[in-house]
């Protein structure tokens, strides 16, 4: 599945969609596929601060737990509460099942993120052994 | 790393798994499917319908010759003299210290003819160890036939109805832990055993390991099970199924650092069988000295959090008292369960413990194992 081109990506397999000063963050389809059936998503609270490249929560599948890394710094303005009861939404559509919305403290941090093409290439490198 | 060490072993169904787009992992040096359609769906298929596993990575070691029973008795902890022809038993190979070399199934194929099914990752070690213990005995012939067999596990409440379509053998007449030889999917002399590692009814069949025969058997079982919603199942579901069903896994609950006593496997440890077996003297000394200090217990997480292999177990005061050996969400029970070693006194108290789940200390209660028991018919 090719990555949506309107999003930016991290090497930790998160995506972000930026609209004005608000970024919406989730994990990529590659990430959900690698994890397998997701059973638990642990998210911060609204009002919490997140920092670029720092963990903001975790996602657990039957097999493993994996940290979530924020692509940007800022303040959490919303969390996807649906994931508390239906974490499998992430498996169904990783790009629809967003996790947090962040009021960006430093919009220029986006420049350090990967484009869809760069992220695709990164995955190809990771899996293409 | 050399090219050779990177080369994973493949079962005869490797192309089949890849065509099914299975997620593949390195498991004990084998390129094996961990899941196909999804671990939870595969797990539920086995609990409620039927699932098919490629377990051809398992090893098969045969003991033949007039001294074969004596040799099997020497290297295993269960009493193989109790086996009838066509019967299998759970057993283990123990070190001189009474810890595990591996856990195994012993099948009595005939008089003076035993087949030991061993774990994939330990097979070479097991075979070398067996040879070192009994290889010089008079009247024993040991063979590693692992590469000669493909092994398929058909597991679940609809396993019998599925396999029934492919054989004239009366499957219902095969009791638990018994086996017969019959024709399955046109393949003659197939060893059909009513065994498994899922906690459900089911069969394990052993067929020649060539690709054509193995693919034919796999395809026939998938087709026969279609009306029951059969799913190909990977090692991920195999692990969660065995954990729910309270079955130990080598490298986790049992290892060369644990004995059958602390692992709660005394039922298969026959200290008084007629032959002195390797490890017995050490276990006798351990029992005489009051037994092992720790005990394997079942845990169910009370608070939100999933225990994972290797996570510390703490007491109310926050002191580390043990370790999780296997932990996972239980897809059928829909709770988070774990096996852990804790001191005897803690196990006997039945009191709640805590698992250090990353940054959080999560309460867990001690529960009886197996966590899951299949409903009686």
Image (cartoon, coloured by chain):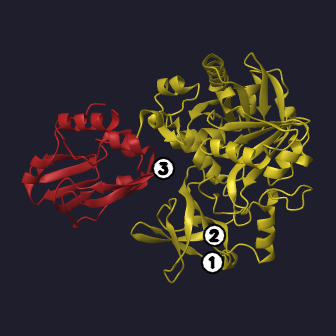
Residue occupied by mark 1: B351
- What residue sits 63% from the left and 57% below the top? B255
Label 1 marks a residue whose chain is B
* Viewport quadrant of the N terminus of chain B: top left
Q: Whole-percent x and y of residue B269?
A: 81, 59
State which chain disc 2 sits on.
Answer: B
Q: Residues within 10 Å of mark 1 (few under 14, many from 20)?
A: few
Q: Nearer the viewer, residue B287 or B268?
A: B287
The image position of residue B349, as x and y in percent, is: 67, 79
Residue B32 is left or right of residue B359, and the answer is right
Q: Secondary structure at mark 2?
A: strand
Q: Is residue B85 visible?
A: yes
Q: Are marks 1 and 2 in contact (CB under 8 Å)?
A: yes
Instruction: Tell me the quarter of the image containing the C terminus of chain B.
Output: top right
Numbered badge on residue B56? none
Asked where in the image residue A30 lies, by quadrant, the reply is top left
The outermost residue toward the left is: A108
**Hue used for the chain lettered B:** yellow
A47 versus A24 height, above or below = below
Q: Residue at x 56, y 54 (%)?
A: B334
Callouts 3 and 2 close, C-beta under 8 Å: no
- At a point 35% along the width and 57% down the height, the residue shown is A58
Q: Which circle marks residue B366 in the picture?
A: 2
Q: Is residue B103 left or right of residue B53?
A: right
Q: Which residue is mark 3?
A: A63
């Amino acid at each position: 599945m090719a990555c949506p081109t309107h999003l930016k990506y991290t090497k930790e397999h998160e995506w972000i969609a930026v609209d004005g000063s608000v970024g919406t963050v989730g994990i990529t389809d590659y990430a959900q596929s690698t994890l397998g059936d997701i059973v638990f998503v642990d998210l911060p609270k609204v009002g919490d601060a997140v920092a670029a490249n720092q963990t903001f929560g975790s996602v657990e599948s039957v097999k493993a737990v994996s940290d979530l890394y924020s692509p940007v710094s800022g303040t959490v303005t919303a969390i996807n509460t649906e994931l508390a009861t239906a974490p499998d939404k992430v498996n169904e559509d990783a790009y629809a099942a967003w996790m947090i919305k962040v009021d960006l403290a430093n919009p220029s941090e986006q420049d350090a993120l990967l484009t869809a093409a760069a992220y695709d290439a990164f995955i190809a490198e990771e899996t293409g052994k | 790393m050399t090219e050779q060490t990177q080369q994973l072993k493949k079962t005869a169904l490797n192309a089949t798994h890849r065509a099914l787009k299975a997620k593949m992992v390195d498991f004990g040096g084998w390129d094996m499917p961990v899941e196909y359609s999804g671990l939870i769906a595969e797990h539920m298929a086995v609990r409620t319908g039927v699932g098919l596993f490629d377990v051809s990575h398992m090893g098969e070691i045969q003991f033949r010759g007039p001294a074969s029973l004596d040799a099997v008795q020497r290297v295993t902890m269960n009493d193989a003299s109790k086996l009838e022809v066509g019967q299998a038993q759970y057993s283990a190979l123990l070190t001189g210290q009474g810890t595990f070399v591996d856990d195994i199934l012993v099948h009595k194929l005939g008089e003076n003819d035993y087949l030991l099914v061993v774990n994939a990752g330990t097979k070479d070690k097991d075979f070398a160890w067996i040879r070192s213990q009994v290889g010089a005995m008079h009247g024993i012939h040991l063979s590693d036939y692992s590469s000669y067999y493909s092994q398929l596990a058909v597991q679940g409440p609809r396993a019998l109805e599925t396999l029934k379509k492919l054989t004239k053998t009366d499957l219902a007449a095969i009791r638990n832990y018994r086996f017969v030889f019959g024709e399955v999917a046109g393949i003659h002399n197939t060893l059909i055993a009513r065994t498994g590692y899922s906690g459900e009814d089911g069969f394990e069949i052993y067929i020649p390991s060539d690709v054509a025969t193995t693919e034919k058997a796999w395809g026939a079982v998938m087709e026969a099970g279609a009306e029951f919603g059969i799913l190909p199942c990977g090692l991920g579901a195999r692990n969660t199924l065995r954990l729910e069903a309270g079955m130990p896994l080598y490298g986790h609950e049992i290892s060369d650092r644990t004995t059958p006593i602390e692992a709660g496997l005394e039922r298969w440890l026959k200290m008084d069988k007629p032959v002195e077996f390797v490890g017995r003297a050490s276990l006798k000394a351990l029992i005489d000295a009051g037994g092992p200090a720790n005990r394997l217990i079942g845990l169910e997480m009370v608070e939100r959090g999933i225990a994972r292999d290797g996570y510390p177990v703490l007491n109310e005061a926050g002191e580390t008292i043990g370790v999780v050996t296997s932990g996972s969400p239980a897809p059928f029970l829909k709770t988070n369960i774990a096996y852990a070693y804790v001191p005897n006194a803690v196990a006997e108290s039945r009191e709640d413990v805590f698992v250090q789940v990353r940054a959080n200390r999560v309460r867990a209660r001690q529960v009886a194992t197996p966590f899951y028991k299949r409903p009686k018919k």
